């Protein structure tokens, strides 16, 4: 210690004595703490008011601003921060809401969500950019796709793209209460599913689940994936890129991330994928919802079916009847009536097209549709008791002389 008190450094003492640096530092620290004189402290401006602050705190005044204003009225010239420092140890420590981690069996669950990623600027102006994120619960493999809207049709397409990417459909799929899926979800009530989304789920064989309202941590796996995309992928994106290029880039990035060591499972998603895939149901990529759903439409009087903004011609005999429109693979539609195919067309490539006008419409429509009643001319008769009486004109001559 004599060398240390003579202002020699620990390095110089180590060279002189040959002792280890850690040993010298420990001895110096022990001796310094034992013999160091007490710290000299100067009085604080709040010292005369300490008892008053404690008394007001016990009375229930826990607002530092109010206490500071009261002290100023008594002559206190210190700042608000001095009062805050005084009451800080008196405040109870705020904890965080405990969140138990919920792990699922292989193939048992997937989670999906949307996220806003700002605009993508085209030559004719900006368009909104969103990501659809889909995470397998057990392996943590993820599918990410950038889109321009959050419509129900877009959601269905993204889900089917995720099914095709992984080659399987899990048991339940957990999401938040997004509009394309959920009509209403009271905080303490049952979920009212969108009927079309419920039919989509039944078509593909998964069970939809909605997170509790205002509790995003219920679907923490996909929420964390969204943040991971923002922090790990988004900084890698070049300033100029197309939507197609962006999706190709994010697919390659997600495949590379499958080889990383996951911070929660302490395993690579690629290593846990075989079990996740085995626990889910296989997916047939040719079985798309667009080819299984059909829409009822009433044929107009001029024998056209209106669908998706287009007009499709059908035979004149179907005018006024209800028919079914169904998409067919890969890019066409089929119009049926009572299981009979009336017409098949390719999907129009331009908006508001009239398709198939020459099919049966070149000739005049039939004069009368069979089984349709025709209004006939009829002769009506006034009942006898309602015929007015007739009088002889001589009656008026007696009353009014000519």
Image (spheres, grey):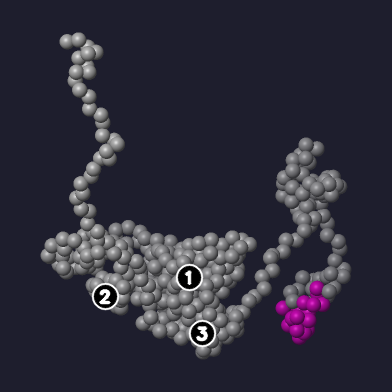
Q: CA distance from mark 3 to mark 1?
A: 19 Å
Q: Earlier in the sequence, mark 3 or mark 2?
A: 3
| Helix, strand or loop status at disc 3 | loop
Residue 27 highlighted magenta (yes or no): yes
List x then y, in percent, for residue 85: 75, 53
Instruction: Report whether 15 appears left or right of 170.
Output: right
List x then y, in percent, for residue 142: 49, 78
Determine which quarter of the picture holds residue 131: bottom left
Residue range corresponding to the magenta coloring: 11-29
Query: Which numbered tag is attached to residue 10?
Result: none
Is there CB contact under 8 Å for labels 1 and 2?
no
Rendered view: 74 above or below 40:
above
Rendered view: 39 above or below 400:
below
Q: Residue at x 12, y 65 (%)?
A: 362
Looking at the image, the residue that sits furthest to the left is: 363
Query: Which numbered tag is attached to residue 280?
Result: 3
Would you call the spot at circle 3 few (<14 residues within 10 Å), some (14-19), or many (20 or more)? some
- Give the residue at mark 1: 198
Q: CA distance from mark 1 to mark 2?
A: 28 Å
Q: From where the camera sits, is residue 234 visible?
A: no
Camera-nearest residue between 229 and 5? 229
Would you call the spot at circle 1 few (<14 residues within 10 Å), some (14-19), or many (20 or more)? some
Rendered view: 10 above or below 187:
below
List x then y, in percent, for residue 132: 45, 70
Q: CA distance from mark 3 to mark 2?
A: 37 Å
- Give the residue at mark 2: 341
Is there CB contact under 8 Å for labels 3 and 1?
no
Q: Earlier in the sequence, mark 1 or mark 2?
A: 1
Q: Earlier in the sequence, mark 3 or mark 1?
A: 1
């Amino acid at each position: 210690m004599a060398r240390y008190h003579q202002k020699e450094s620990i390095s110089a003492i180590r060279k002189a004595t040959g002792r280890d640096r850690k040993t010298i530092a420990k001895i110096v620290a022990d001796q310094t703490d034992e013999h160091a004189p007490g710290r000299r402290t100067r009085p604080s401006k709040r010292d005369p008011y300490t008892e008053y602050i404690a008394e007001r705190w016990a009375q229930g005044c826990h607002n530092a601003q109010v206490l500071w204003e009261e002290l100023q009225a008594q002559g206190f010239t210190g700042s608000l921060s001095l009062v805050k420092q005084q009451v800080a140890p008196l405040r109870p420590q705020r904890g965080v809401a405990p969140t138990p981690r919920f792990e699922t069996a292989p193939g048992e669950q997937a989670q999906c969500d949307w996220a806003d990623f700002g605009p993508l600027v085209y030559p004719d102006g900006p368009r909104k950019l969103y990501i659809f994120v889909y995470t397998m619960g057990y392996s943590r493999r993820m599918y990410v796709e950038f889109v321009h809207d959050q419509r129900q049709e877009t959601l269905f397409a993204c889900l089917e793209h995720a099914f095709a990417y992984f080659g399987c459909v899990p048991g339940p799929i957990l999401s938040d209460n997004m509009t394309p899926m959920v009509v209403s979800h009271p905080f303490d009530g049952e979920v009212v599913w969108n009927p079309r989304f419920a039919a989509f789920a039944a078509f593909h064989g998964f069970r939809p689940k909605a997170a509790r309202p205002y509790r995003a941590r219920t679907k923490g796996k996909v929420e964390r994936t969204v943040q991971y995309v923002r922090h790990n992928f988004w900084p890698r994106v070049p300033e100029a890129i197309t939507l197609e290029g962006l999706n190709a880039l994010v697919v390659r990035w997600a495949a590379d991330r499958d080889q990383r060591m996951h911070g929660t499972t302490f395993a690579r998603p690629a290593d846990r994928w075989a079990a996740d895939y085995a626990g889910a149901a296989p997916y047939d990529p040719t079985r798309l919802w667009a080819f299984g759903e059909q829409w009822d439409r009433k044929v107009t009087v001029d024998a056209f079916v209106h669908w998706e903004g287009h007009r499709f011609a059908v035979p004149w005999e179907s005018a006024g009847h209800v028919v079914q429109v169904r998409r067919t693979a890969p890019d066409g539609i089929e119009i049926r009536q009572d299981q009979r195919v009336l017409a098949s067309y390719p999907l129009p490539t331009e908006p508001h097209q009239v398709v198939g006008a020459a099919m049966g419409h070149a000739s005049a429509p039939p004069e009368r549709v069979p089984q349709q009643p025709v209004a006939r001319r009829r002769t009506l008769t006034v009942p006898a008791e309602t015929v007015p009486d007739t009088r002889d004109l001589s009656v008026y001559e007696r009353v009014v002389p000519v």
